[in-house]
Amino acid sequence: MPLAVGSFDPLISAGPALVWTVVLTFVFLECAFIIGLFLPGDSMLITAGIVLASHASGEAQVWALSLGTMIAAIAGNQVGYVVGHRTGHHLVARKNGRYINTRNLQRVSELLQRHGFLAVLVARWIPWVRTLCPMVAGAANMDHRKYTIASTIGAVIWAPVLLLIGYYAGSFLERVPWLMPMVIGTLVAGLIAGTALGIRHYRQEMAKPAEEFDVEHPAAVLEAEG
């Protein structure tokens, strides 16, 4: 058993610094830019919590990282809003795109128009909506104060909850010495594979022909499609 745990000593030793770097980068990108659509955000947060549970200072680290992820998510949302706002009412969609298509932009636009503040809160828990929402809100000129309050509340709830779920699940797994290394190895391998696959899908998506999406008149765009 000690050999199994020892085989992950480099990962556990590098844990806090590596986890902080990956988590903060992923959270910011997922909330700010289109590439975030293709990153494994939720599973990454849970994995980070489990990895930190293996470290001696894990409890202090996970609470500090929870605060860090809140700040990264809030900052990412503001960047995403500004990016959308600077496009005016026109966003770039991708013909036959898997995520960045006019239909998905239409759904997010309608969600914001109908539910506003509540929609921004709910968007935090839906991966692809989480990334598109800030840009659509900015392009639609949603009241910035209302958007900031809603996105901040969402950030305070989302990332820390998933991190803590991972951490306390990891604390439970620590009671079974042979199981923890296996779980960490599987999750980290899955995270690396998911990230590589996501980047590949992002490149494929962005290579598709671009088309304009008008936030003010989304229905007209869909009618023109067919």
Image: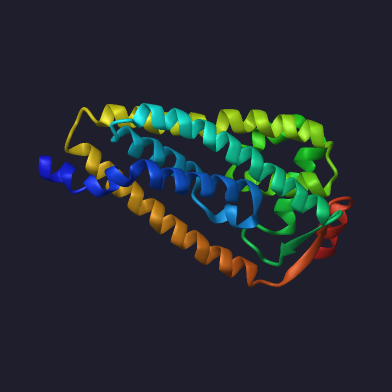
Can residue 115 be seen at all in this image of the molecule?
Answer: no
Left or right, residue 109 beside residue 58: right
Q: Quarter of the image for the N terminus: give it.
A: top left
Query: Which image quadrant for residue 165?
Result: top left
Q: Residue shown at 34%/43% (left/top)?
A: 15
Q: Residue shown at 71%/43% (left/top)?
A: 78
Left or right, residue 180 beside residue 24: left
Q: Quarter of the image for the C terminus: give it.
A: bottom right
Count of labels in the image:
0
Pinpoint residue 171: horizontal percent, then vertical percent. Answer: 30, 28
Left or right, residue 10 beside residue 45: left
Between 202 and 68, the residue placed more toward the observer is 68
Can residue 151 be seen at all in this image of the molecule?
Answer: yes
Q: Residue shown at 65%/33% (left/top)?
A: 122
Pinpoint residue 69: horizontal percent, then vertical percent. Answer: 54, 37
Pinpoint residue 114: horizontal percent, then vertical percent. Answer: 81, 35
Pinpoint residue 17: horizontal percent, then vertical percent. Answer: 39, 44
